[in-house]
Image (tube, helix red, strand yellow):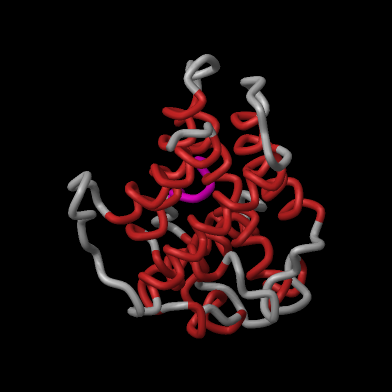
Amino acid sequence: MDAVNLKNPDKRTAGQKHGDLRTALLSEGLALLDNEGIASVTIRAVARNAGVAHSAPANHFPSRSAMLTAIAAMIFAELADMSVAAVAGMDDQPEQALQAFADTWFQFAFDHPNRYQLLWQRQLVCHEDPGLEGEMNRVYSTLLSILQRNQIDRRVDAETDAIAIWSMIHGYISMRLDGNLVAANDSVSNLPRNKAILLSLIDGIYGRD
C-alpha cells in the first residue's frame, strides 16, 4: 500500500498544514519499527521524529496500543494486497497458488522481521480492531479460497487444510526469526526447507503417496 512507504521530508508541514498528521505518525512509527524494533515505537518517539509536540498524537491515537494496532493494520493490508496479487490468474492451479501465497509470506517476513513480529503481539496489538481484523480476514480468505477451488476427496475440510498451512508458515517463520532454525535445503528435493515443508503438506492435501 502507498501509505506504508510514504516519504515525508517536511514532517511539521505535513502534519500541521495538510491535516495529514496521522499518516505522518504512522510513517514514522513504521520507520522506527524497521530500524529499531517494536520496543522503540512509542508515542513520544514517534511524535519527536514527526516534529510535533508529544501531546499531538493523542488526537489520533489515545494509547500506544492504538498506534501499534493502526501500524499492524497497515502492514496486514500490504500483505493482503501482496497475497492477492501473488495468486492472481492461478484459478486452475491451486498447488502453484498455495506455493505463491506461502512464498509471499516467507519473503516478507525474512525481509521485514520486525513488521512480521509486531503482527502477532496480542499484548500490544488489538486483534479485535475492525480495521485490523478485516485485513487479517482478507489474507485468510485468500488462502481458504485456493483450497476450495478443486473438488477432491478430503479426509478433512478445507478450513482444516488452511489452518494446517497457516500454522506451518507462521511456525516456520517464527522459529527462523527466533533463531531456533537456520536456513537450509531439503536433501531430497534440494529446495529451501520452507518450500519443501509446504510441498510435503500439499502432497498430503492432494492425496499423493
Front one among 193 and 31: 193
Of all residues, the one furthest to the front in this rendering is 209
Q: Is residue 156 left or right of residue 78?
A: right
**Residue drawn at point x = 53 percent, y = 78 percent:** 41
**Residue drawn at point x = 33 percent, y = 48 percent:** 196
Front one among 51 and 69: 69
Above or below — where is 193 with respect to 140?
Answer: below
User: Which image quadrant is residue 73 in?
Assistant: bottom right
Provide residue 1's location: percent of width, then percent of height. Answer: 52, 41
Q: How many marks?
A: 0
Front one among 115 and 30: 115
Provide residue 67's location: percent of width, then percent of height. Answer: 67, 69
**Residue drawn at point x = 35 percent, y = 54 percent:** 194
**Residue drawn at point x = 71 percent, y = 42 percent:** 156
User: Which image quadrant is residue 9 in?
Assistant: bottom left
Provide residue 191's location: percent of width, then percent of height. Answer: 23, 47
Q: Is residue 141 left or right of residue 193?
A: right
Viewport quadrant of the C terminus: top left
Highlighted magenta segment, given as a residue range:
1-6
Above or below — where is 166 with respect to 53?
Answer: above
Q: Is residue 187 left or right of residue 146?
A: left
Q: Is residue 5 magenta?
A: yes
Above or below — where is 167 with respect to 135?
Answer: below
Main secondary structure along the magenta-highlighted residues: helix
Q: Is residue 104 magenta?
A: no
